[in-house]
Amino acid sequence: MRALGAVIICAVIFIYGMCASAKFKSRRKSLECAKELMGFIKNEIRYSSREYDDIIAGAKRSKRFERLTFLKSSENIKNARCFAEKMNIAIEKDSGSYLKPSDRQAIAEFFCFAGTSDKEGQINNCLLCEQKLESNLFRAKSDEQKNEKLYRILFASLSAAVFILTV
């Protein structure tokens, strides 16, 4: 009975380690998706001249941007005065995409200036946001490489140590 309890405790510790290491991959994938969203918005501005509400509505319908949960949650925000405020509130409340505050800030800054200038200014805003997301993506990839293995090994060792101590 004691061994069974030790196995269960070790399994829980090991699974927790796997979930903790998966957060690094989720952040990287969310950043890749956000960068792709900026490219999508840039192309829509350049070729279709649609309003931001229409562009974001098109992105919400696309399966490519499902990782960015703030897109879906933005439609539930009613008390915002304008599009930029609505998107910033949705980004602040976002919890499903594992984005760090610096990632959220880059996206929020983009939406603050969305639609406030001419076509070229908006395209430059997209390019600036893409560059910020690219640098964050580079850091996320290096964090993933360093920490994913570390978390797995650490929690596997911890679960083995707990098993040895309890049995």
Image: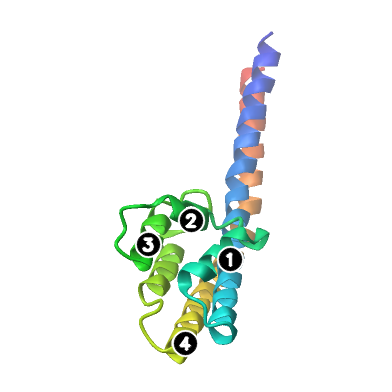
* Mark carried by residue 124: 4
Q: Which residue is mark 1?
A: 58
Q: Is residue 93 above or below residue 10?
A: below
- Give the CA separation, mark 1 to mark 4: 21 Å
Does the image show residue 143? Answer: no
* Residue at the spot 55% in from the left edge and 58% down from the top edge: 68
- Give the CA separation, mark 2 to mark 4: 23 Å
Q: Tag 2: Cα neighbours inside 10 Å, few (<14), some, or many (≥20)?
A: many
Contact? badges 2 and 4 (CB < 8 Å):
no
The quarter of the image holding the C terminus is top right
User: Given the image, on which type of amino acid does mark 2 rest?
Assistant: Phe
* Mark carried by residue 88: 3
Depth check: 2 or 39 in front? 39
| Residue 2 place in picture, x, y as percent | 66, 11
Q: Tag 4: Cα neighbours inside 10 Å, few (<14), some, or many (≥20)?
A: few
- Give the CA separation, mark 2 to mark 1: 14 Å
* Mark carried by residue 70: 2
| Residue 155 place in picture, x, y as percent | 62, 39
Q: Secondary structure at mark 1?
A: helix
Comparing labels 2 and 1, the label whose residue is closer to the camera: 1
- Give the CA separation, mark 3 to mark 1: 18 Å
User: Given the image, on which type of amino acid does mark 3 rest?
Assistant: Asn
Depth check: 79 or 124 in front? 79
Q: Is residue 7 above or below residue 29?
A: above
Depth check: 7 or 63 in front? 63
